[in-house]
Image (cartoon, helix red, strand yellow):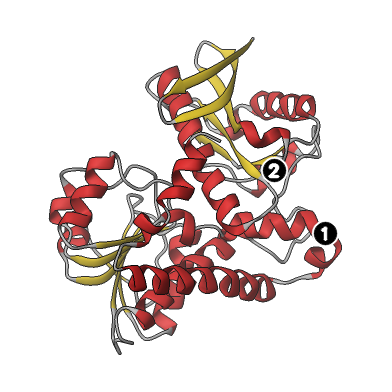
Amino acid sequence: MSVNNELLNPHNQYQVETIVIDDDTSFTLAYSSQIKLLPANGGIRWRNYASRQQQEEEAIMLAQRMSLKHGLYNTGFSGGKIVVNSKRSPQEQPAVLEAIGDLLNRYGGTMFTGCDINTGNREMDYLRQFTPWILNAMDSPQVDTSVATGYGVWSSMKKVLTLRLNHLPRARIAIHGMGKVGAEVAKQSLLFGCEVTAYDINPAAQFPPGVRRVSEDELWAQSSEVLCIASLSNILNAQNVEQLNTRWVISSANSPFSTPQAEQRLLARGIHYLPDYVSNAGAVICDSIEMAFTDRYNQMNQEQVNAYVHSVIGAKTEELLQRAQLLNCDVGQLLQPIKSAAMVA
């Protein structure tokens, strides 16, 4: 069953298509109207949502975030996202991936996908049996785009540390989430000489040597120069924003605030926020290379891809920090026109 509709509110106009697999499983594709001009691009997020409405709202929000990243970095794509709503894992439901392949084939190269939360290379390898519209370093086994994303977040963090925090010799970094992205941020922070503490909801999560593990409440309350959200969207809410004892929030998670009010309260408390679509664009930058320079990309190793992502995101972060300083405003205020445009794309 396929459900086509267009969700409208005063702030967005994104196309939505929802495919129902069975009573417990469905998935939603959301994409910008710019798909008519630029192919849409965004990964597959696989989670259990309380309702179809929540699933579709998440897909739209994530497609908007992808629009922001693609627009800011001129990748040649527009924003899109696929959100699967299921209690079961991808391994238990290969039919869902087959259905996603059928959907992508129907869009005929106007929508590309890849990994996101709870999907990885195994799922992309399986999906590739049914559709070619995947950008995930499939023919570049030396490259992990999640690691590149972490390295890009680190490049933003490094610019903040050097340009706004005066090259602190022993900066304190707090990281929420210790997956591939969080682990890469931790690794680079340690190499830079930072003190690193971190939290992960999974007791079995592996932390890089040198990272001190703390509880979630301890992470919020401890004094730090930078708090990195490397877990899920909507983590920062009205309650824990009041607990934070940091100077900057930098995120690899899309849309880390649960509400606009939570973000406003963070800023009112004097904590700076570098918008997530500035810092977490590593994967879409990789996708842009894979699309435009396929042969070169397939010859690159992780170190070369990291260096490219570091250069692009670092340069953009420095430019935005300098412009915001000259205008005496936050980076988020500086980017508000771009954000408004993405909402109605």
User: Which image quadrant is residue 51 in?
Assistant: top left
Q: Amino acid at mark 2?
A: Met
Residue 204 in picture, x, y percent from top left? 38, 55
**SS under mark 1:** helix
Specify whether residue 157 is in view. no
Q: Residue at x 64, y 25 (%)?
A: 96
**Which is more toward the observer, 222 or 255?**
255
Q: Position of residue 317 (x, y in %)?
A: 47, 69
Res 124 label: 2
Give the quarter of the image for residue 293: bottom right
Residue 157 left/right relative to 124:
left
**Quick check: marks 2 and 1 in contact, CB under 8 Å?**
no
Tell which circle, 2 or 1, labels the residue nearer the N-terminal end: 2
Look at the image and tell me in which quarter the C terminus lies. top right
Left or right position of 262 against 305: left
Near mark 1 (Cα within 10 A), the count class, few <14, some 14-19 or many ≥20, is some
Q: Amino acid at mark 1?
A: Thr
Q: Residue at x 40, y 56 (%)?
A: 275
Task: Report whether 281 appears left or right of 329.
Answer: right
- Residue at image position (50%, 60%) is 180
Q: Which residue is mark 1?
A: 294
Q: Secondary structure at mark 2?
A: helix
